């Protein structure tokens, strides 16, 4: 069973609004065992919408459209679908009209003809109630194919998708079990990883499909199966393959599940009941932001110091002025003292420190842009790491340094 998404709106094409609807639809359909094989976006232009629909329907079983269901002149989806499916007339759906009236009353706006038109639907569709907005969804069928039109507002779209569309699809179609599982790898380039796990990848069963998903915060490897007879059995088979992979690259293997690096670090800190603090220069508080992005972070994160100025490094963190003068602020000596200083200041088990040159200015021949020193203080010492991240954009250097700092924390001490 296959599907496609068709996102309608000029605002999507000009980059004014990000398309988050396609991702939400894909997640929902995937959980139902339906593969999304195409995603398209077109503007508020009737011929473009009709052409896209005509091209997609021969390729898939289901097309889900979002957008263009509003009351204004640029909202053309409803009219186009009425023509496409041969509606004889547009009719007022009583339940949809009652819903519009309810929302108008609750919101304090006066009903007018445009609001009333929200309840107008083609006489050939099944209406999908929208409890969160005025535009109902619509379900069309022809020759065994299904076209579903949903409002473009994401929270309205997801409400109808999960409460109306998903149950109908499950009832109407018998779908195979689709199973995915993910692991996070960190500290190795994608090409080097592919070389190291080549034999393992080549030995995977034919029904398992491997995907590489590189990000600034590591590489996610996803194994998928699309024809399993049982979801639990499929996941178990994938888990066994990933456990085998872990023995091949143990030093780079962060953990199982579709989680971020900060989540894995947070889990370790919580399980071990350890605490951590941060001292940051070039990362500007980003490491602390990652650590505190996880719910429950107050259990392990005590605080941080953004010591951008050397005077702050000296007065707050206790870095020796002579070491800054002799070795520079971006050095092993300084970052070590930053980590020890914030560890002492906050009274934590662990501490992370970062000092570097994020650019695009500030680099020298000895310390070019992208030079970053990291330190992780633990109960028995300090581990340091020098990064040479190259002349990358500033935000990428900050992101990469922050992620590597978290990974350094993960790897040190008495885990």
Image (cartoon, grey):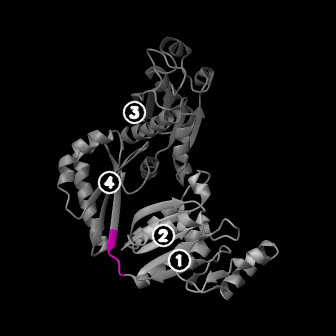
Q: Are marks 2 and 4 in contact (CB under 8 Å)?
A: no
Which numbered circle lies on residue 84?
1
Magenta highlight range: 174-178
Q: Reply above or below: 336 against 82.
A: above
Q: Does label 2 or label 3 sit earlier along the sequence? A: 2
Q: Secondary structure at mark 3?
A: loop
Q: CA distance from mark 2 to mark 3?
A: 64 Å
Q: Does label 4 or label 3 sit earlier along the sequence? A: 4
Q: Reply above or below: 385 against 5.
A: above
Q: Are marks 2 and 1 in contact (CB under 8 Å)?
A: yes
Q: Secondary structure at mark 2?
A: helix
Residue carrying label 4? 211
Q: CA distance from mark 2 to mark 4?
A: 29 Å
Q: CA distance from mark 4 to mark 1?
A: 38 Å
Residue carrying label 3? 380
Q: Are marks 3 and 1 in contact (CB under 8 Å)?
A: no
Q: Does label 2 or label 1 sit earlier along the sequence? A: 2
Is 203 in the magenta?
Answer: no
Q: Secondary structure at mark 4?
A: strand
Residue 301 appears in the picture as rendered? no
Question: Within the image, what quadrant is residue 80 found in?
Answer: bottom right
Which numbered circle lies on residue 344?
none
Residue 50 in the image, given as x and y percentages of width and height = 52, 69
Residue 349 in the image, given as x and y percentages of width and height = 47, 39
Which residue is at 49% across, 11% downward?
326
Q: Reply above or below: 127 against 333.
A: below
Q: Nearer the viewer, mark 4 or mark 3?
A: 4
Q: Secondary structure at mark 1?
A: helix
Residue 184 appears in the picture as rendered? yes
């Amino acid at each position: 069973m296959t599907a496609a998404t068709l996102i309608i709106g000029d605002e999507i094409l000009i980059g004014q609004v990000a398309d988050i609807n396609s991702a939400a639809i894909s997640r929902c359909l995937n959980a139902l065992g339906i593969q999304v094989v195409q995603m398209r976006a077109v503007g508020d232009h009737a011929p473009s919408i009709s052409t896209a629909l005509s091209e997609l329907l021969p390729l898939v079983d289901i097309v889900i459209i979002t957008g263009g269901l509003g009351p204004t002149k640029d909202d053309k989806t409803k009219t186009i679908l009425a023509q496409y499916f041969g509606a004889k007339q547009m009719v007022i759906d009583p339940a949809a009209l009652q819903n519009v009236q309810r929302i108008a009353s609750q919101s304090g706006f006066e009903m007018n003809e445009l609001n009333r038109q929200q309840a107008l639907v083609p006489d050939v569709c099944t209406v999908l109630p929208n409890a969160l907005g005025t535009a109902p969804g619509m379900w069309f069928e022809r020759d065994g194919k299904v076209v579903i039109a949903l409002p473009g507002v994401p929270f309205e779209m997801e409400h109808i998708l999960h409460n109306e569309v998903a149950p109908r699809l499950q009832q109407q179609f018998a779908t195979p079990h689709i199973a995915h599982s993910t692991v996070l790898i960190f500290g190795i380039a994608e090409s080097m990883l592919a070389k190291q796990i080549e034999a393992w990848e080549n030995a995977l069963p034919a029904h398992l499909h491997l995907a590489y998903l590189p990000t600034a915060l590591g590489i996610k490897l996803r194994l998928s199966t699309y024809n399993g007879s049982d979801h639990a059995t499929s996941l178990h088979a994938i888990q066994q393959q990933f456990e085998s992979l872990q023995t091949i690259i143990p030093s780079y293997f962060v953990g199982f599940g579709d989680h971020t690096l900060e989540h894995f670090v947070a889990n370790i800190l919580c399980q071990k009941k350890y605490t951590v603090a941060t001292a940051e220069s070039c990362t500007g508080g980003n490491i602390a932001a990652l650590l505190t992005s996880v719910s429950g972070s107050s259990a392990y994160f005590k605080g941080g110091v953004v010591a951008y100025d050397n005077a702050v490094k000296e007065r707050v963190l206790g870095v020796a002025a002579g070491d800054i003068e002799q070795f520079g602020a971006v050095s092993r000596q300084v970052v070590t003292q930053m980590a020890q200083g914030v560890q002492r200041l906050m009274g934590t088990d662990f501490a992370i420190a970062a000092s570097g040159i994020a650019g695009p200015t500030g680099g020298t021949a000895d310390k070019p842009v992208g030079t970053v020193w990291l330190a992780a203080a633990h109960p028995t010492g300090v581990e340091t790491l020098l990064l040479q991240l190259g002349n990358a954009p500033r935000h990428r250097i900050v992101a990469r340094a922050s992620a590597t700092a978290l990974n350094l924390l993960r790897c040190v001490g008495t885990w």
